[in-house]
Amino acid sequence: MNLGISRLSGTGQPRTSEPGASSGPWDSPERYCDAIRDGDRRAMARAITLIESRRPEQAAWGQQILERLVPYTGQAVRVGITGPPGVGKSTLIEALGLQLVERGHRVAVLAVDPSSPVTGGSILGDKTRMERLAASSSAFIRPSPSGGSLGGVAHRTREVMLLCEAAGYDVVLIETVGIGQSEVTVASMVDFFLVLLLPAGGDQLQGIKRGVMELADCLAVNKADGAMRDVAERTRAEYAGALQLIRPTTASWRPRSLLISALEAEGIDELWQMVGQHRAALEAGGELEDRRRKQNREWMWSLVEQGLRLAIDADPDVAGRVVEFEEDVQAQKRTPAAAAQELLAIFQRSRSG
Ligand SMILES: Nc1nc2c(ncn2[C@@H]2O[C@H](COP(=O)(O)OP(=O)(O)O)[C@@H](O)[C@H]2O)c(=O)[nH]1
Ligand SMILES: [Mg+2]
């Protein structure tokens, strides 16, 4: 199974003499796999660099490694966590991660950060480094792949998740921020999706989009501590009411609400219990496997779309006409539909000719 799009651009088989790809003691994809499955973090980090690389020969190595690892993936509990900047996602992930590590789990933390390369900097913030958790030998923390489209960033994160599973991490926590499409994208790669919210005074449900609420397996109000505790409980009750109005995405799980203080490590046990209950409920009906199969199918098609788009962008005949078509569409000289059809026809002729 080829999990990537690199082959579409015709890079072919990687050679062992490929510059840069084999630096370090791992001179073949097989060696990488053995080292990763032995829990060698340097091999993991290096393989992730290959997977994330934009150099075709390196990316091809990354795909070779992944293909060999796929049989050893799938056993982790996959949890996605979203919420507005500053709500406490990183603080929660670190507190949860530390507890899980203490109980013998191996925890991988990944991030999907759609920050624009123009504005620079990460929306997920400095705390994403999670120093205490990072110090544990049972934790692996990987910041978001930088730059590129959200689709590209998410695609690489998904592959890194598989790599972590093959390396024996049995919990994968993915942090993303509630901006644009990133929640939808992360929800499409996890088993359990947590939406974190702030305690809010008054009775307005703060800026949570209905669509996001529908993705949530749990809505949790964080910072339920100190003077904010009562407000947090009122906020939770409001969300619990709102959740009643939502049609659950699966027959076996109705989304729940929860109070958390990530700072004081309260509500974390309840959260993890809930993840377990959710898993048991979905597994009982075979729905967990269904969900993952569906995710894999959708992922395949999104890779096909990305690959086609890359091929179209790289096509010289198309490239020669793109500006003209864009201008015509903007000036309403051609309809978008007609222009799209013509561009696709140019692409097809160029491919067959
Ligand atoms: N009082 C309180 N502060 C918190 C809690 N969780 C996080 N914070 C603080 O909120 C700020 C943002 O936290 P961070 O985890 O970086 O938020 P993120 O942007 O969602 O990842 C930091 O100053 C945290 O210390 C909490 O449960 N209670
Ligand atoms: Mg953060």
Image (spheres, helix red, strand yellow):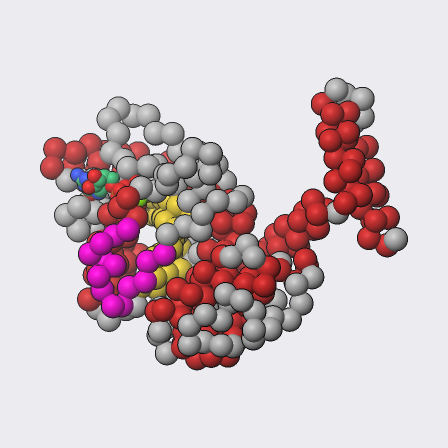
Q: Name, please, the residue furthest toward the right.
A: 353
Q: Quadrant of residue 304?
A: bottom right
Residue drawn at x 49%, y 51% as measured from the top left: 154
In the rendered image, residue 275, in percent from the top left (x then y), is placed at 33, 58
Q: Exactly how many numbered labels are in the figure? A: 0
Q: Is residue 65 visible to the viewer in this orientation of the structure?
A: yes
Q: Nearer the viewer, residue 245 or 351?
A: 351
Q: Quadrant of the N terminus?
A: bottom right
From which residue to which does the magenta span run? 129-142
The residue located at (66%, 63%) in the rendering is 11
Place residue 190 in its image quadrant: bottom left
Residue at image x 28%, y 44%? 126
Q: In this rendering, is residue 279 above or below 209?
A: below
**Image point 37% across, 61% down: which residue?**
172
Q: Is residue 4 visible?
A: no
Residue 176 picture location, percent across and down? 39, 45
Q: Position of residue 236 (x, y in %)?
A: 27, 38
Residue 123: percent from left, percent from top: 36, 39
Name the foreground residue: 113 vs 169. Answer: 113
The quarter of the picture where residue 120 lies is top left
Q: Does the magenta portion include 219?
A: no
